[in-house]
Amino acid sequence: MENKQSRFVYLVILALVWGSSFILIKRGLVGLTPFQLGSLRIVFAALFLLIIGFRSIREIQLRHWKYLALTALFGTFLPVYLFSVAQTQMSSSVSAILNSLTPLNTLILGILLFKIDFQKRQIYGVVIGLVGSALLILNGAANHPEHDYSYAVLLIIASICYALNVNFIKLYLSDLKPLSITTGNFVVLLVPGLLVLYFSGFFEAVQHEETQQVIGYIAILGIVGTAIANILFFKLIKISSPVFASSVTYLIPVVAFFWGLVDNESLTNIQFLGAAIILVGIYLSAKK
C-alpha cells in the first residue's frame, strides 16, 4: 500500500521538476550553444552527486558498470544534447509534448527487445499516439515556417533513449539503490561531459556577460532537474514498472505548457488536438 501511494507522489514531483526543465533549457540557450548547455548540465549534476553520493559507489559491483554505462548513455548523455539542439528550433511546450511519447516507446521496445506481454488495445494506443505526433509536427511546421520542425525527430529519438533507459534499469539494476545508480551514471559521464564542454568553446564564451547570466539556470537544471530528479525517477522505477514510471511524461507537458504561457508561447487548436490524441494513445498503451 505504501508503494502504491508513494509512487504517485514521486510521479507528481517529477512532473513538476521535469516540466520546468524545458523553460530552463530555453533560457540557457540565450547565452550557450546546445553542446555547452548539455555538457554544463552534466557537469553540475556529476559534481553534486559526487558530493552527496560518493560513498554509495562502494555498493556498485563490477557486473553493474556496463549497465550503468548504457543507462548513462541513453538516459542522460544523448538526450541532454538532443533536447538542447531541438529547442533551438522548437518551443518548450511542443518539446514537452513530444517527450510524452516515452511510454509508447517503452511499450514498443519492451515488446520487440525485452519480450514483454502485450494486448491488442496497446498496439492501437501506439498507432493513435503516432498519429497525434504527426498531426502536432505537421501543423506546427505549417503555422511556424520560421521553425524547422524536422528537429522533432531529435525529440523522438530522445524519447526512445529514455524508453531504453527505463527497461535497462528495471531489468539489470533493480538490486542497486537509486542513489548508487544515479551517482554511478554520472561518474561515467563526468569526463565525457568535461571534454565536450572544453571542445565546445565554453571556457572562452564564459568570459561574456550573456553567458555568465544564464549559468544559474543550468545549475538548477543540472542539480535539481537532472541529479535529484534521476534519483527520484530510479526510485519510482524500482517501486513500480517501466511503463508506469515513464508515464510521468503524461503530466510534464501540462507543467511545460503553463511555463510556456508565462513566456508568451502558444499552441494552435490543431496542436491541442494532436496533444490530446497523443495522450489518448498513451493511456491505451499503458492501461492494463
Image (spheres, rainbow, N blue to C red):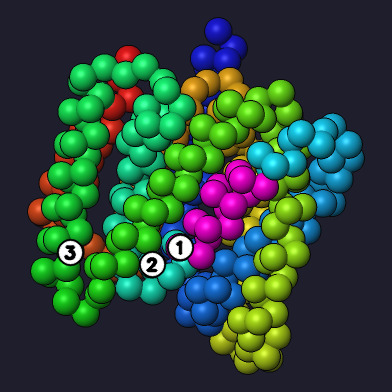
Q: Which residue is mark 1?
A: 82
User: Regarding mark 2 in the picture, which secondary structure is present there?
Assistant: helix
Instruction: Write down the region rendered in magenta.
Output: 69-82
Q: Is residue 244 left or right of residue 166?
A: left
Kindly identify which numbered label has been placed on residue 140. 3
**Identity of the amino acid at label 1?**
Leu
- Does the magenta stretch mainly form a helix, a strand or a loop? helix
Q: Position of residue 166 (x, y in %)?
A: 52, 35
- Amino acid type at image mark 3: Gly
Residue 214 at x, y percent in the picture: 58, 76
Position of 209 with respect to 79 (left or right) is right
Residue at numbered disc 2: 86
Q: In the displayed structure, would residue 201 be above or below residue 238?
A: below
For badge 2, the amino acid type reads Ala
Q: Position of residue 273 (x, y in %)?
A: 13, 46
Res 280 visible: yes
